[in-house]
Image: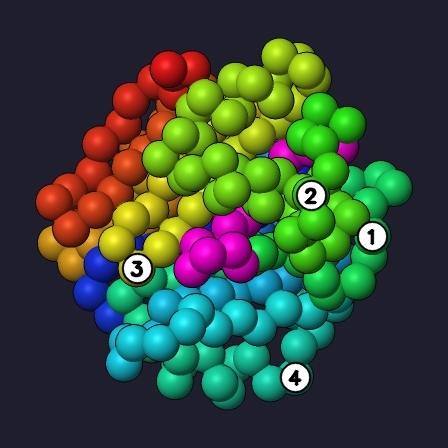
Amino acid sequence: MCRHLAWFGAPRSVASLVLDADHGLLTQSWAPRRQAHGTVNADGWGIGLHPEGGGAAARWRSDKPIWSDTNLASMAPHLVAGRVIAAVRSATEGMPADATAAAPFLHDGWLVSHNGRVDRAAVGPSLDAESACDAALLAARVVAAGPGRVGATLHDIADADPAARLNLLLLSRDQLFATRWGDTLFVRHDDDGVLVASEPDGSTGWEEVPDRHLVTVTAAGVRVAPLTSG
Ligand code: GLN
């Protein structure tokens, strides 16, 4: 399925986060190393950030493979922010194929990405969802329920669809929540900030997040804890 990442820290360029790293997200779009579901992530991509100067979150999404974009390589060094999210998509069978189904989704200032699949009936309908895609419905529901309650929301959804895979990234200006539920998730912490990603790039210092755990990042630091229903 998809691969995604989020950066919470000092300003960094999208190029350094997505394009430049050995085995980084760009490479993961055609050669992921830890991906259990799907082989390539060629059904679209998206990048979102909270601009350094303030104001609304900005997004750039596409229904094409990220490696085929003719503008990204020249623009990405100039997209610089301390809150960045990025995803490459392998569409779940039966889901819409257009760019509105590509992460990140945006609700109430939260940029959201989903790596996984879920029965849409288990998520329930949403008038706010940006697409009929399972990921879009999930993003709308989790933000509407309150990102701080993501554990309870995921437990409710998993009760209705026990086979659901629910890896999520939720990024505001002040907080990052990253869940591992059924797919892979890693975290890397350095002096400049915290990077969470579906799988490590070629750098050292990555730690694997246990399944059904939540990574919470704020200016105060990073915490990894079980995803509880309470
Ligand atoms: N189910 C979502 C979609 O179709 C996410 C897919 C994924 O994780 N590959 O876009």
Identify which amino acid the numbered label 4 is placed on. Thr
Q: Quadrant of residue 150?
A: top left
Q: Secondary structure at mark 4?
A: loop
The N terminus - image quarter: top right
Q: Residue furthest right?
A: 94
Q: Earlier in the sequence, mark 1 or mark 2?
A: 1
Q: Nearer the viewer, residue 14 or 145?
A: 145
- The answer to whether marks 1 and 2 mark residues whose Cβ atoms lie closer than 8 Å is no
The C terminus - image quarter: top left
**Which marked residue is nearer to the observer: mark 4 or mark 1?**
1
Q: Quadrant of residue 191?
A: bottom left
- Magenta residues, as a range? 106-120
Q: Secondary structure at mark 2?
A: loop
Residue at which label 1 appears: 96
**Which marked residue is nearer to the observer: mark 1 or mark 2?**
2
Q: CA distance from mark 4 to mark 1?
A: 24 Å
Q: CA distance from mark 4 to mark 2?
A: 35 Å
Residue at which label 2 appears: 126
Identify which amino acid the numbered label 2 is placed on. Ser
Q: Earlier in the sequence, mark 3 or mark 1?
A: 1
Q: Which mark is residue 70?
A: 4
